Image: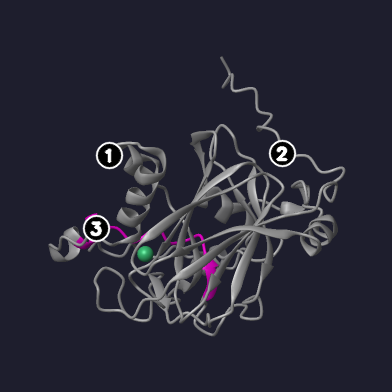
């Protein structure tokens, strides 16, 4: 530990400075939620995939379609990765999504891709847990503050070799879907949207915490695909994440992913977002 530095005379005044929001989102292109709602109302189900406990599964969604993640049998959190279906280099950027929308996502928030793309990949259109808000511990649901559980951290902390962390589940699923060797698939796996997971930072030490998810069978999170997507979802070995997440100790359940297509013409006037407009000259 480092020694605590002496407080300056004006420490209280410096602490009392009011925060400003880093990225006021009023300037972001807003999703046309009324159009999405109308399109969803007439949509038909195209496909479904069940993600087995402690495993991951992939799914494909075309731009303009919807996908829904449902907890079907018991409280279970899911780790979600998204890629551009035609270019795995474009993938979900949890850090910028957090900077834009806050620590936890809900209806109206979007999942943004990384540089140099930086465009909405998906928009959350329904969240049956949106009643939860922020609890007395500072916890909330569907975070973009965690990473994904992985075997490297477990090895670092406890010397373990555990193979069903979300990182490994997502790696195997992406390799199986694309034919990529395991090591190349692993490099495409990225920090996740923690679907249904209830997390926050402790107020006294600022540490990342989790607690039992409030999700119950029938709860779902639904998305509108803004671009053609390849998705991978892992049913986390933490189950409801009430205790631990890098072993086979927790009770785990499957997750259901369903894909829905709106009726022909239901998205009239809507366009899949183009690439970010920055010219990429970086001052040269
Ligand atoms: Zn996990």
Residue found 33% across the figure and 56% down from its top: 169
The dot on residue 151 is: 3
Q: Which residue is mark 2?
A: 273
Q: Nearer the viewer, residue 88 or 47?
A: 47
Q: Dot 1: what SS?
A: helix
Decide: is 82 above or below 103.
above
**Circle 2 sits in a helix, a strand or a loop, which is it?**
loop
Q: Position of residue 273 (x, y in %)?
A: 71, 38
Q: What residue do we see at 35% from left, 59% from top? A: 166
Asked whether the viewer can see residue 255, the reply is: yes
- Does residue 194 sit above or below 167 in this rendering? below
Q: Left or right? Give the position of 217 relative to 170.
A: right
Residue range corresponding to the magenta coloring: 140-154
Q: Residues within 10 Å of mark 1 (few under 14, many from 20)?
A: few
Q: Quadrant of the C terminus?
A: top right
Residue 143: where, in percent of width, then height?
51, 65
Q: Is residue 153 magenta?
A: yes
| Vertical side of 234 occupied by 274: above or below | above
Tag nearer the camera, 3 or 1 = 1
Measured Cα–Cα span from mark 3 to mark 2: 36 Å
Q: Residues within 10 Å of mark 3 (few under 14, many from 20)?
A: many
Secondary structure under tag 3 reads helix
State the mark number for residue 183.
1
Q: In percent of the image, x 62 and y 41: which residue is there?
A: 228
Residue drawn 62% across the image and 61% down it:
19
Quarter of the image where one finds residue 116 = top right
Q: Residue furthest left?
A: 159
Quarter occupied by the N terminus: bottom left
Q: Position of residue 25 (x, y in %)?
A: 72, 53
């Amino acid at each position: 530990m480092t020694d605590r530095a002496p407080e300056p005379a004006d420490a209280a005044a410096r602490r009392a400075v009011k925060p400003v929001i880093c990225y006021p989102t009023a300037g972001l292109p807003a999703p046309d939620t009324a159009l999405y709602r109308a399109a969803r109302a007439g949509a038909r189900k195209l496909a479904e995939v069940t993600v087995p406990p402690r495993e991951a599964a992939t799914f494909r969604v075309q731009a303009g379609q919807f996908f829904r993640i449902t907890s079907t049998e018991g409280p279970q959190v899911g780790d979600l990765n998204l890629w551009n279906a035609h270019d795995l280099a474009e993938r979900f950027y949890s850090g910028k999504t957090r900077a834009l929308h806050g620590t936890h996502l809900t209806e109206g928030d979007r999942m943004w891709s990384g540089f140099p793309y930086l465009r909405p990949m998906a928009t959350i259109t329904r969240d049956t847990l949106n009643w939860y808000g922020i609890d007395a511990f500072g916890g909330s649901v569907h975070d973009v503050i965690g990473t994904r559980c992985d075997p490297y951290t477990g090895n670092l902390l406890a010397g373990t070799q555990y193979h069903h962390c979300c990182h490994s589940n997502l790696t195997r699923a992406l390799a199986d879907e694309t034919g990529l060797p395991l090591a190349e698939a692993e490099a495409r796996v990225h920090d996740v949207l923690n679907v249904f997971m209830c997390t926050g930072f402790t107020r006294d030490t600022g540490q990342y915490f989790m607690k039992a998810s409030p999700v119950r069978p029938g709860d779902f999170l639904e998305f509108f695909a803004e671009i053609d997507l390849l998705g991978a979802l892992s049913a986390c070995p933490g189950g409801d994440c009430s205790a631990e997440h890098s072993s086979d100790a927790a009770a785990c359940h499957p997750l259901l992913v369903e894909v829905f297509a709106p009726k022909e013409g239901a998205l009239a006037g809507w366009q899949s977002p183009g690439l970010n407009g920055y010219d990429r000259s970086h001052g040269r």
